[in-house]
Structures are given as C-alpha cells and as structure tokens.
Amino acid sequence: MAASLPAGLNSSAQPSPPPRNYSSMHAAPPPSSFATLHPSQENIRKEVEDEIRNLHSENQVTVAKAAAALVMVATLPSAEPYLLPAVTQLSLLLENAGSIHVRRNACAALTAIMNASLHHYIAVAESSHLMERLLQCLENEDGDKGLQINVVAAVTVLAQRGEGLQVIKETEADVKLLSLLECTDDASLEEEITDALCALAVHQEMRSHLVMKGAVSRLAVKLRTDSSEICVRVLLGLGMLCGSSQEAQEQLAETDSAIGTLLHLIKSDDPDIRAIAHDLFAALCSNKQVKPKIEHVLRRNRATKDI
C-alpha cells in the first residue's frame, strides 16, 4: 500500500518484547482488568495508577511491562485523565534505564500518550529535556534498531505541531535524522525516517531549513530503493521540498543519477510512484537551470538505446 502524509497525531511506535530470558517473547500483556471489552472507569484509573507506580520499580522486567501496558491503555479515551503523571518518569527512563527494552517501551508509551489528545501532546512536547533524551536513544551505543524506530516515530508525532517543531529545531533533531538515513540500510528504519522527514516538510517554514541541511541529496539517494513504500515516501518528501524551490530542484538535478532514476520511476507499475515521479520531474523541467541537464540525460539514454 502506498504511503500517505501523516495526518493527525498517530505513530507506529511499538512496545518492545521482553529479552530472551523473560517468560514471553511478546510485549507484556495488558493488565487483567483490560480483559473485558468494557472495563469500568474505576478499573482503568486503578490500573493506570498501578502501572505508573510500577515504572518506579527496581525490577527492569516490571518496568518494561508497565511501560508496555501504558502503550495499550493510552488508546482508551477513558484513560486520558490519568496518563499525564506517567510522563516525567517515562522521560527519565529514556536516559537512566539500563535495559534497552525499558527504553523502547518508554519511548512507545510517550508516543501513545501524545496521541491521546492535544493536551497530552503539548504536555509531552514541552516536558523537560525530552528531545535530548530521545536523541541519546537514537544514537544508542547498541545500535538497537527497535529503539531507533520508536524514537523516530516519536519525532514524527512531535513534528506535526509547532510545539514539537520548536524542540526539533532547537536540538537539530532533523540533522540527526538525515545523518541516520544516510548511514542505515535497514528498510524499516528508512521507512520511519522518511515518514518523519515528510512530517517536517509539510510545514512551509521547515522546507528551506531542510534544503539547507542537505535533505534533498540524502533523500534522492534513496530513490533507488527496492521498497515501493520507501520510494513513495521519498518522492513525497522531495515533492514538498522541490515543488516550488529552484534551489532544491537544482540540488536534486545535481545528485548522481537522480534525473535518470526519475525517468525510470515515471514508467513504474506502481501508480502512486508513477504519478508523484511525474509531478516531480515536471517541476524540474520548469527550471531553466536544470533543463540542460535533463536534455543531456535524455540524449544519453537515446544514444544508449541506439547502440
């Protein structure tokens, strides 16, 4: 299925499974009171408060399961009034937890709480040192892809409003994402990063900033991916950056093989790839500085066919 631009507050962040010496290889099950289809308001309040207390446990298994449970309960509208007290401890766990699984789940829980409501989003986005801690997790020495994916998913949600954009710009989180995109070959992580960059590029005020930081060339390299999901996301991002920016168009044209790759994508069997690539190529053709490069590639392609 083709990707679409982020709409509303949503994220793919997932709780981490326990490590291999735990009793289960899946995310912690929801508390027992969630087994019924319609848990009472009192049960929800009690379970949320219990899990928040468990976040302070010295037992890493207990903490990881508590954070995973909060990911699930945060999807219940009736849980909204009780979630905010978890934010400070979840943020601290990003920095101080010894277990990679605790950090994965804490990150996913913060993302789930941001998704609960605008009020919750603002509370998390404005919490002290949040982005610094997220970036520490992004650069974790273990290189854990699950943790990195959850961090990027959190950044994607933060990018959807001004409060989050402010901390992203202040900490240059966008630059860290671009650097990670350049050096990773993990498809799931690439997909998550391109989602985050699209969420940033939606905002007009971020586009020139991203162009200045080298987003165009780094995204363009990923056009040669074998993944249609990543390709669509990259095209969407480039479309937003290059649609009305001559500077971005010229950067794209200067990127090795970008014009030839676009010509190939215009003939793709995927209708979304074909349509977005066509629009992006049309934007390049409208730029007088780029047009000679396009004509050169077309002549070279014709000459190659004639051989």
Image (spheres, grey):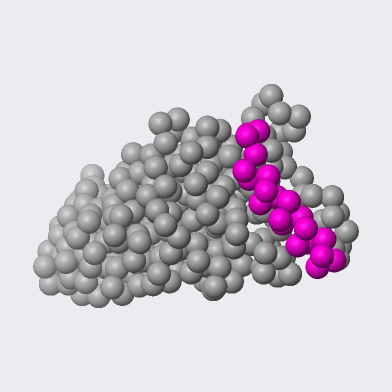
Q: Is residue 190 magenta?
A: no
Lateral position of residue 109 relative to residue 190, left or right: right
Residue 190 placed where, x, y %? 43, 47
As rendered, which of 215 and 299 lies closer to the eye?
Answer: 215
User: Would residue 112 be seen by someone viewing this image from the given angle?
Assistant: no
**What main secondary structure does the magenta stretch of the protein show?**
helix
Residue 40 placed where, x, y %? 85, 66
Q: Which residues are magenta?
A: 40-60
Residue 56 position by quadrant: top right
User: Would residue 290 be seen by someone viewing this image from the given angle?
Assistant: yes
As rendered, which of 227 and 140 lies closer to the eye?
Answer: 140
- The residue drawn where x is 76% and y is 55% is 47
Number of marks present in the image shown: 0
Classify the position of the C terminus by image quarter: top left
Lateral position of residue 303 relative to residue 265, left or right: left
As rendered, which of 100 and 234 lies closer to the eye?
Answer: 100
- The residue drawn where x is 43% and y is 64% is 126
Residue 52 placed where, x, y %? 66, 51
- The residue drawn where x is 60% and y is 59% is 85
- The residue drawn where x is 65% and y is 33% is 59
Lateral position of residue 298 relative to residue 6, left or right: left
Residue 60 position by quadrant: top right
As rendered, which of 253 and 307 lies closer to the eye?
Answer: 253
Q: Is residue 44 magenta?
A: yes
Classify the position of the N terminus by image quarter: bottom right
